[in-house]
Amino acid sequence: MIEIKDLSFRYGKHYTVFEQLNMNLKAGYIYGLLGENGVGKTTLLRMLAGLRFPNEGSIHVMGHEPRRREAEFLSEVYYLPEVIDPVNLSLNEYVKIYAPFYPRFSHEQLLRYAGEFGINPVQKIAKSSHGQQKKAMMCFALACNTRLLLMDEPTNGMDIPSKGIFRRLIASAADDNKCIVISTHQVRDLENLIDPIIILEKNRILLNNSVEEITRRLWFGRTPQKSDKDLYREECVGGYNIVGYNDKHEETKVDIEMLFNAAIQNKGLFKRMFIDEQNPSQRSDFAEEMQKRLNADPQN
């Protein structure tokens, strides 16, 4: 679905966002795009949508170069930004103008989504609250049924019931022919929805793996005492919540917020564990490093 090869992007001469970035995303998945502020999550989404262009390298989406903005490509991509520009139209009026650009647009789905979110389709969108405006545009985005759906911080401004509706609608909209990429800081809102998980760091990727692959390597849980082999820990009532090596091959549930904090605290290690490990020439070095860490823990 998406192939990014040796991608470099800069703002001006001195601010490099990406340098030799490589990544592949497949249809049939809901990707969670995570990263600290300023690492380029929004820039990457805009590049996938053809709204920004690489300085070097290439992006191919469904066989198209987004920068060319061909009609066939644009009809299969929808980008929902974090900040919605004021739309002085009702949802019905907006649909009448823009739905014809999307060949699989479903009016039936739009009405169902609007009903779920409590959107009045004849009210001017700009006269609604920020949260209602975002939900109105989300209804339109989902009803377009594009093969690629890009969403930037979609749950910002939503109340708790609306976040539950959002998760349900995204899950129902996903299928084997679609790729959904959601950039978010609100990881708790999407914890049971996104898989695989991508963590961006400046100029590189720390993680682009499925939940299954992550939990095969890492252990998530609570322990009464800390250990030298903990990759990340947070003190809690009765002990510590930790992320550590899954050296005993136990099945645990990934905690995305803890995972993100562990990755940011162990950037080089995560890159070697999840990115370099895919390169056969790097595997033995990482295996040796991991074994040294485990052997160094007297409690192991």
Image (cartoon, helix red, strand yellow):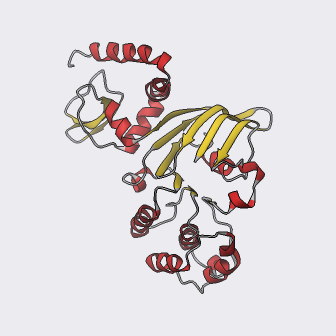
Q: Residue at x 50, y 39 (%)?
A: 199
Residue reaching furthest to the bottom = 122
Asked if residue 46 lies left or right of residue 35, the reply is right
**Which residue is nearer to you in this view: 147 or 38?**
147
**Where residue 81 sits in the image (x, y, percent)?**
62, 59
**Where residue 191 sits in the image (x, y, percent)?**
38, 51
**Where residue 201 sits in the image (x, y, percent)?**
56, 34
**Which residue is nearer to you in this view: 241 or 237?**
241
**In which quadrant will I find the C terminus?**
top left
Asked if residue 157 lies left or right of residue 39, the reply is left
**Where residue 204 sits in the image (x, y, percent)?**
58, 31
When the figure is inspected, residue 290 is found, relative to residue 110, above or below; the finding is above
Residue reaching furthest to the right = 13
**Which residue is nearer to you in this view: 76 or 233?**
76
When the figure is inspected, residue 187 is found, relative to residue 206, above or below; the finding is below
Residue 59, picture quadrant: top right
In this view of the protein, can residue 38 be seen by the observer? no
How many marks the image carries: the answer is 0
In this view of the protein, can residue 62 be seen by the observer? yes
Q: Which residue is drawn at 46% across and 59% down?
A: 175
When the figure is inspected, residue 173 is found, relative to residue 22, above or below; the finding is below
Q: Which residue is drawn at 74% across and 61% down?
A: 71
Asked if residue 56 lies left or right of residue 4, the reply is right
Residue 24, picture quadrant: top right
Q: Which residue is drawn at 45% across and 62% down?
A: 170
